[in-house]
Amino acid sequence: MQQGKVSITVVLVIFCLIIVVILPFQKVFSFTETRMANPRVHYIPITESEKFQIRYTHSIHNSDVYESYQYVKGNRIQMLEMEYEDLAIGMPGYAEEGQTFIERDGKYVLQFDDHREIDNFTILIGDLGLDLVFNYEDVEYDLKKDLQRGKSYLFEIRHLSLYEQWKGVRMK
């Protein structure tokens, strides 16, 4: 009788541990290399803030561009605005439908008013010696240091299990 209770307890403990390890509970910003059979997931745990930013140096203007986003409705991504110093090649000088173009503190700001949402986007880690940084909760993650240059990564917001976190790479 006593041995049966111990066996049931051991089975329940093992079952609970398996559930804890495989159940995806940690919400993360995920960077998964594209065009690979078994890609490794690089991730940043999401804590409080829903907003994040990507800062990169424009390759022609040599000035910083800030793209601001937030996550909404679970795992969807919404672009809020784009801020930059120079117009011309590759940078819009006017607003289209659902956008507002303003000048703020000597910089140009393109705001996205239509609240479009996407599931993910692909980001190329260029091989130029220019900045590419992910900002979240006042921490800068150097994407050119943490990810491989010349490769594309699928960026999305998702939940990872403990097992997936152990297999992946936590960005610092």
Image (spheres, helix red, strand yellow):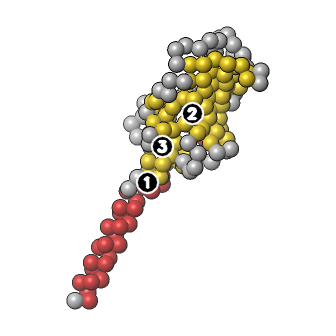
Label 2, residues with CA under 10 Å away: few <14, some 14-19, many ≥20:
some
- Alpha carbon separation for disc pair 1 and 3: 16 Å
- Residue topped by disc 2: 69
- Give the class, few, some or many, for how many residues have Cα within 10 Å of label 3's Cα (few <14, many ≥20): some
Coordinates of residue 82 in the picture (x, y in percent): 62, 25
Q: Secondary structure at mark 2?
A: strand
In the picture, the quarter occupied by the N terminus is: bottom left
Answer yes or no: is residue 94 visible.
Answer: yes
Q: Earlier in the sequence, mark 2 or mark 3?
A: 3
Q: Nearer the viewer, residue 89 or 129?
A: 89
Secondary structure at badge 1 equals loop
- Where is residue 142 shown, x and y percent of the image? 65, 38
Q: Quadrant of residue 52?
A: top right
Badge 3 marks a residue whose secondary structure is strand
Counting from the top left corner in percent of width and height, residue 63 is at 73, 22
Q: Is residue 36 left or right of residue 152?
A: left
Q: Looking at the image, which residue sits at the far bottom?
A: 2
Q: Amino acid at mark 1?
A: Phe
**Res 141 seen here:** no
Image vertical order of residue 3 relative to residue 51, above or below: below
Q: Amino acid at mark 3?
A: Val
The disc at residue 41 is: 3
- Does label 1 or label 3 sit earlier along the sequence? 1
- Give the Cα distance between marks 2 and 3: 21 Å
Residue 91 placed where, x, y %?
Answer: 64, 15
Name the one closer to the observer, 114 or 32.
114
Residue at the image point whose x is 56% and y is 42% from the top: 50
